[in-house]
Amino acid sequence: MAAVPFSVSLLSTFSKRFLRPELTALCSYHKKVVDHYENPRNVGSLDKNKRNVGTGLVGAPACGDVMKLQIQVDENGKIVDAKFKTFGCGSAIASSSLATEWVKGKSIDEALKIRNTDIAKELCLPPVKLHCSMLAEDAIKAALSDYRLKQEDKQ
Amino acid sequence: MLSPGRTISSRLLRPALWLPFRLCPERTATSSRPKELIKKHELEKDELRPLYMDFQATTPMDPRVLDAMLPYQVNYYGNPHSRTHAYGWESETAMETARKQVADLIGADPREIIFTSGATESNNMAIKGVARFYQAKKRHVITTQTEHKCVLDSCRILEAEGFSVSYLPVQKNGLLDLKLLEDSISADTSLVSVMTINNEIGVKQPIEEIGQICRSKGVFFHTDAAQAVGKIPLNVSDCKVDLMSISGHKIYGPKGVGALYVRRRPRVRLEPLQNGGGQERGLRSGTVPTPLAVGLGAACSIAQKEMEYDEQRVTMLANRLVQKIMSEVPDVFLNGDHEQRYPGCINLSFAYVEGESLLMALKDVALSSGSACTSASLEPSYVLRAIGAEEDLAHSSIRFGIGRFTTEEEVDYTAEKCIQQVRRLREMSPLWEMVQEGIDLKSIKWTQH
């Protein structure tokens, strides 16, 4: 029947054509959040056993939000790589993705200055989603403190 | 089912409106034309709308229902309560015909059907009306924890008025424990309210047994059958139901109308919520909206004729969807009893993937979720909590609704997309990663918020 190849071609059409961001904005996903969600930057893992890698794991599955943020720091104290993995809603994924983008290239002290309000403002998060940006800030801090602990341990 | 061109509305409405949107040729017209001929405004208008897989939220109106309603909108517009002229008489005839159609569907007498504005009003009427009428002698009402919000909220108002309400817990499979119900009924109980089919998890309660228990104890039994009427065979006498709520827009009828079945033998008395000219046996004053009532009647009569066919088809499609997803993706759980359910309502929990993010990934399918993020209060669905779903699984649930107009292609597409996106989101999930490494998630001390 003609319906079968038609639907197969539709399947490929859908994967190319996505709903316009304006349409998704109608359902209160800001296009920046959608962008980070569809093209998340820095998804993945670093080797947590390495000495220059700090891992932050925050949140709880019972709350519906868990973020794991890892940073790789070079000898000069500058963050050269960051990776994240998140169990959470679109805004949580976008917040953690943005967080990894921002910490890259910063020094440890500069990374500590990142605030959840900045993340929320950048992504235009509605009030009900502000806790996602707070968790992202916590994740950065947790990763940095883990790194610091590792350095102190070695010493 | 319907031969286009035969009815007024099929000419007025494009077939696109009841065919799956994606598969209708006119709607994808711009993609087949050469680029130069497509004007900018056409491209912008040619926004593809999502596949509809949320039949528990609402259903599209069946074109045959619209056909039945249209004459009463523009031609036969009389008030059915006008006794003095033909406009009133013809509207009254239509209203009574519709009443008979609704009654036939549930095995009731037409005099026992009251038209309302929807199942919410019917539930309010039933619970508050019965409780208040008998309040001199009986001040106890029983319901379950998985009822619809309107039932729970009505009970809360009764509590504020001084009634005592028992919210019975359900078992892990979503079914009510009959022994617990029997033990909870006392001499002070006036009403038991248990919904027939749950709108979130699709679980079907043992209505016949509950009716039997209530009848033997002399307690009125109300059931919110909004999701069940027209989908499964229901008979108010076999189930010993005294009050039943019906919703128009859940059975391919119009929005804004519903009905309440109120038993006459033995008579159920209730205090009306809406007072006025005494319409609808004095129980619900107000002009009955003839077109909406006719639409509800038509929807019920169509449902009665097509129930068996629809049931078979929906079961086939539901099994197709569930088997496809569960065979390709591990760690997926079907919430609610696997046997005692309505097949068209499928609530799946995808472990290690959050519900709202999955909904966002499946943006070209209209679905809903039991996750906190999609509710304004950040609390996961109370129904999933009542069945004892673990908190993280409650956050990971998606409800798929299949109905009369769902096609195999839509189901296949949804299953494919779901499998793909769950895999992608699991790659992004730290919980999945930990499980792959063999870590037991329950052993981890999570940071509290």
Image (spheres, coloured by chain):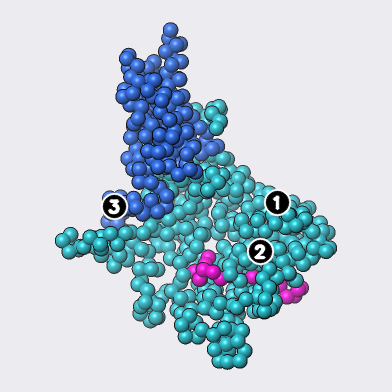
Chain colours: A blue, B cyan
* Residue B157 in view here: yes
Q: Which of the two labelled residues, at mark 2 and mark 1, occupies the earlier sequence position?
A: 2
Q: Amino acid at mark 3?
A: Arg
Q: Which mark is residue A17?
A: 3
Figure quadrant of the N terminus of chain B: bottom left
The amino acid sitting under disc 2 is Asn
Q: Chain of mark 1?
A: B
Q: Do the residues under discs 2 and 1 have CB atoms within 8 angstroms?
A: no
Residue at the disc numbered 2:
B124
Residues flagged by tags 2 and 1 on a common chain = yes
Name the residue beneath numbered marker 1. B168
Question: Which residue, as the protein is rendered here, is positioned at the far top?
Answer: A155
Disc 3 and disc 2 on one polypeptide chain? no
Q: Nearer the viewer, residue B392 or B13?
A: B13
Alpha carbons under labels 2 and 1: distance apart: 19 Å
In front of the other: label 3 or label 2?
2
Query: Dot 3 lies on which element?
Result: loop
* Residue at the bottom extreme, as displayed: B85
SS of the residue under disc 2: helix
Q: Quadrant of the C terminus of chain B?
A: top right
Q: Secondary structure at mark 1?
A: strand
Q: CA distance from mark 3 to mark 2?
A: 45 Å
Point 36% across, 71% down: residue: B15
Please state which amino acid type lies under the numbered disc 1. Leu
Identify the residue shown where x is 58% and y is 92%.
B85
Mark 2 or 1: the one toward you: 2
Residue range highlighted in magenta:
B249-267
**Counting other residues with Cα less than 10 Å from the Cα at mark 1, is it few (<14), some (14-19), or many (20 or more)?**
some
**Residue B345 rendering spot, x and y as whole percentages:** 52, 57
